[in-house]
Image (spheres, rainbow, N blue to C red):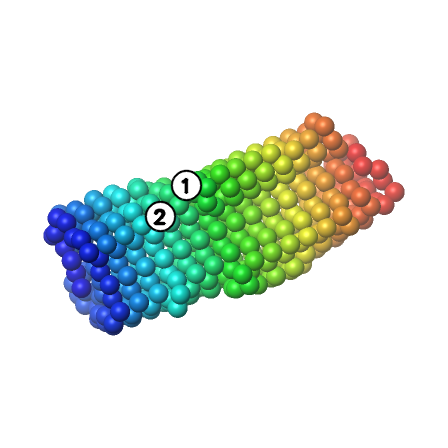
Amino acid sequence: MNVQTTTVFSGGITNSGTISVAGGASPGFGRALWLGTSSPGGAISTFSGGITNTGAILAQKTGILVKYGDTFNGGISNSGTISSASVAGIVAANVTTFAGAISNTGNGQILTAGSAIKISGIPNFLGGITNSATISAGSGIVASSGSTITGSIADSGPLVATSGPAISIDSTSKIIGGTKTAILINGVGSTFTGNVTNAGVLSSNLAALSILDLSTFSGSISSSGTISAGGTGLSVSNVTSMTGNVGNSGTISAGNIGLSVSNVTSMTGGVVNSGTITAGAAGVNVTNVNIASGVVSNAGTISAKTGINIAGSSINGFVSNFGLISAGSGIIVSNNSTITNGITDTGQILATSGPGQQHDHQRYHRHRPDPGDVRSRHLDRQDQPG
């Protein structure tokens, strides 16, 4: 189905049956439900009413494609099945204003070797993206090519990305969460497979990127862009099993904690900052986490009340500072934490109101990279903080 070269379209499109489209040599072949054209000349000026699928859409290339146009009102809702053999499940591209959410809910399934949901070249995307059903795709949810989402990306259903990122924001795009978390993954015991990457801008009055309540998270979380949050910048909490790193190589400005990992039963991977973190509380926080193999490391710059806070955690690895920590207290280790390979500082810690390092009777070693460096010393149960 292709709707094009229409100034105004009102009433929306609903599918409760089956649309099945094979591929072909023409660029338009293989697209099951297509609004617009391959170039701006045949675009729909204004579309109102949205697109709803409760049936089955089976496509060789793209299940639902909205491309070119001035205004799209009503959103795209799927509670049926969208299956695409190659390109994508749902694509919205090159629309000046897209007003309405894209959602996959209920018994919905988006199955594709390409991207499940892709937003490209939309400067005003108003409404957010929600998945509470099933996504199995090469890549999960992607925002690219100068897209600005005012709202949030929220996932609470099973999401598996087999060959690309599960959630990706490119360097030209941004999410403005406002009173919502910009990216929220709240699985309530479910499984999430794939990386979460931000190379653009995430902003929120609350947390900017939050992952919580998952049984299994397989993938890394990384931000090389900008995060601005009234609460915590990047947070992982209440995960049973996690495989992958949590890292920042960009800029985080947070009213509370910059980078936080808490209540993770088993983690294989590190918590690493190589960018810049400015935070009202801790720059990097690791609380009640069992890191079976990995590190907690700063190779960037942290300005916060506490630089690195380790509490109630077991780290089979080391804690290190290779960068600059400017904080009230530099590194605090507390609540019976254990660090197998100790603490290493070859950078600079400027503690303005507390100790550079503080520990409460944990056994670890602070390695001495330079015998002449007075900051390097051995700490054991008899040492006093400071």
Amino acid type at image mark 1: Ile
Q: Is residue 248 visible?
A: no
Q: Horizontal placement of 322 versus 200: left or right?
A: right
Residue 117 in the image: state x and y as whole percent. 35, 57
Q: Which residue is mark 2?
A: 127
Residue 361 in the image: state x and y as whole percent. 82, 46
Amino acid type at image mark 2: Gly
Q: Is residue 76 above or below residue 233?
A: below
Mark 1: give few (<14), some (14-19) or many (20+) Cα within 10 Å: many
Q: Number of numbered discs present? A: 2
Secondary structure of the residue carrying numbered label 1: strand
Secondary structure of the residue carrying numbered label 2: loop
Quadrant of the image for the N terminus? bottom left
Q: Horizontal placement of 113 versus 49: left or right?
A: right
Q: Which residue is mark 1?
A: 176
Splitting the image into 4 quarters, where does residue 321 fall?
Answer: top right
Residue visible at 42% across and 48% down in the picture: 152
Residue situated in front as seen by the camera: 86 or 102: 102
Q: Is residue 356 above or below residue 131?
A: above
Residue at the far front in the pictured view: 11
Residue visible at 66% across and 40% down in the picture: 308
Residue visible at 25% across and 49% down in the picture: 73
Quadrant of the image for the C terminus? top right
Distance CA(mark 2)–CA(mark 1): 11 Å
